[in-house]
Image (spheres, grey):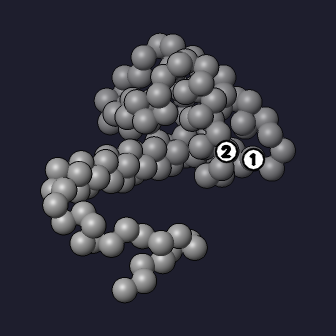
Amino acid sequence: MDHRRHGRSLPELDDRAGSGTELRDEIDQLREAVWSHAVIDQAVGIVMALGGLTPEQGFAVLKDVSHQTDIALCTLAEAVVDWAPSGELPYGIRVCLAGELNKARATPGTQQPPAAAAV
């Protein structure tokens, strides 16, 4: 059977039959990747709502805050998602996020959010 996706051949399942540990490790990695992606998407949505931003702008804000604070993107995203219900966000992240939101809002074509949200 020819397993092709994006022009590359996928390994045959028979080749991995004897490596149950490798399969479990790969499944764990895939689960982590799906979870990380979901958390980042949720954080992008929060940033979009706060700033009246597009998805691309929301992601760019998170990426810039991650870079400036030297916090991994997924860890930052978790903090933003946790902040929504708790109202607690570390001061350094809060200050950096506010600055990046202000920059993004100043971009031509950015819509202002319905109610000005304080960061």
Label 2, secondary structure: give it: helix
Q: How many marks?
A: 2
Which numbered tag is attached to residue 57? 2
Decide which of 36, 54 is in the foreground and name it. Answer: 36
Label 1, secondary structure: give it: loop
What residue type is disc 1 on? Thr
Residue closest to the far bottom: 1
Mark 2 or mark 1, whichever is nearer to me: 2
Decide which of 96, 68 is in the foreground and name it. Answer: 68
Residue indicated by mark 1: 110
Residue 111: image x %, image y %?
Answer: 72, 49
Residue at image coords 53%, 70%: 8
Question: Is residue 10 positioned above or below 3 on the image?
Answer: above
Residue at image coords 28%, 52%: 26
What residue type is disc 2 on? Gln
**Mark 2 and 1 residues: CB-CB less than 8 Å, in contact?**
yes
Question: Residue 84 occupies which quadrant of the picture?
Answer: top left
Decide which of 90, 4 is in the foreground and name it. Answer: 4
Screen quadrant of the N terminus: bottom left
